[in-house]
C-alpha cells in the first residue's frame, strides 16, 4: 500500500548498513514505515531500525488530485514522502523531505536535529537530492503549488520564492541555517 523507495539506497560498508527513505502509504490502513528512514543489515537485509518522520497515519496518492478524488483514502494526508536518498556525513544521516524539513539522525535513528527549509507539500519541500561538502548540506527547495483552473485538471505550477523555494545551506552537525538563496 505504498511506502515506495523513490531513490537510491545509501550504503555504509564500514557499519554493514543500508539506509533507505520511504514515501507515504497510498491507501489505508497506513503503516509505521511510511515517510520513514529504514536501516537494513547489508549482509542479511534484515531491518535494524526504522524512524517515521512524518505524523503517523498519512495516506495519499495521485487520485487525490482528480475530480471526485478517485481512489483517494478517506483521510487524505499531506503527501510528505522522502524523494531523495539519505546522505551519510561522518556520523550523521541527513534526510530531506517533501514536508520542507531536513533531519539529522544518528546512526541508530535518533533525531539529532530538524530544520524547516520550506513550506512543503504535494509539490513542495525538498524533492531532489541534497548535496554536501562535509560540513554543510545544501538543500534545494521546490515549494511550487499546482494551480487548478475550472473543473478540469488544467493549470500549471505557481512558484513564490518568498515562501521558501531556492537553495539553503545547513550545518551538518547542528542543522543551523547558514545561508539561503532564492
Image (cartoon, grey):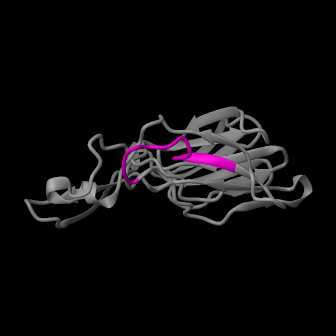
Q: In the shown orientation, is residue 134 left or right of residue 74?
A: right
Whether residue 154 is situated above or below residue 53 in the rendered picture? below
Q: Residue at x 44, y 50 (%)?
A: 25
Asked if residue 15 shows in the view, the reply is yes
76 left or right of 135 in image? left
Q: Is residue 84 magenta?
A: no
For the point 79% across and 50% down, which residue is it? 89
Percent position of residue 175, x then y: 67, 37
Number of marks: 0
Residue 76's spot in the image, x, y percent? 30, 44
- Residue 182 in view, yes or no: no
Quarter of the view holding residue 128: bottom right
Q: Which residues are magenta?
A: 26-38
Image position of 149 (left or right of 39): left
Seen as rendered, the residue at the extreme left is 151
Front-most of residues 113 and 165: 113
Residue 155 placement: quadrant = bottom left
Question: Percent x, y for residue 110?
Answer: 72, 33
The residue drawn where x is 14% and y is 55% is 68
Q: Which image quadrant: the N terminus?
A: bottom left
The secondary structure that most of the magenta stretch takes on is: loop
Q: Residue at x 38, y 46 (%)?
A: 59
x%, y% of residue 120? 43, 45
* Closest to the observer, 123 or 133: 123
Amino acid at each position: 500500500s505504498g511506502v515506495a523507495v523513490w531513490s537510491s539506497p545509501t550504503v555504509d560498508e564500514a557499519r554493514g548498513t543500508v539506509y533507505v527513505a520511504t514515501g507515504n502509504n497510498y491507501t489505508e490502513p497506513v503503516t509505521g514505515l511510511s515517510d520513514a528512514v529504514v536501516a537494513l543489515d547489508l549482509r542479511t537485509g534484515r531491518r535494524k531500525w526504522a524512524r517515521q518522520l512524518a505524523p503517523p497515519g498519512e495516506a495519499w496518492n495521485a487520485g487525490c488530485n482528480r475530480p471526485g478524488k478517485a481512489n483517494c483514502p478517506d483521510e487524505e494526508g499531506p503527501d510528505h514522502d522522502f524523494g531523495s536518498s539519505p546522505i551519510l556525513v561522518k556520523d550523521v544521516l541527513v534526510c530531506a523531505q517533501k514536508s520542507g524539513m531536513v533531519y539529522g539522525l544518528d546512526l541508530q535513528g535518533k533525531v539529532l536535529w530538524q530544520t524547516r527549509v520550506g513550506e512543503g507539500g504535494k509539490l513542495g519541500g525538498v524533492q531532489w537530492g541534497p548535496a554536501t561538502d562535509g560540513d554543510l548540506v545544501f538543500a534545494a527547495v521546490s515549494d511550487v503549488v499546482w494551480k487548478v483552473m475550472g473543473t478540469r485538471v488544467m493549470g500549471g505550477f505557481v512558484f513564490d520564492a518568498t515562501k521558501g523555494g531556492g537553495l539553503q545551506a545547513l550545518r551538518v552537525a547542528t542543522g543551523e541555517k547558514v545561508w539561503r538563496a532564492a
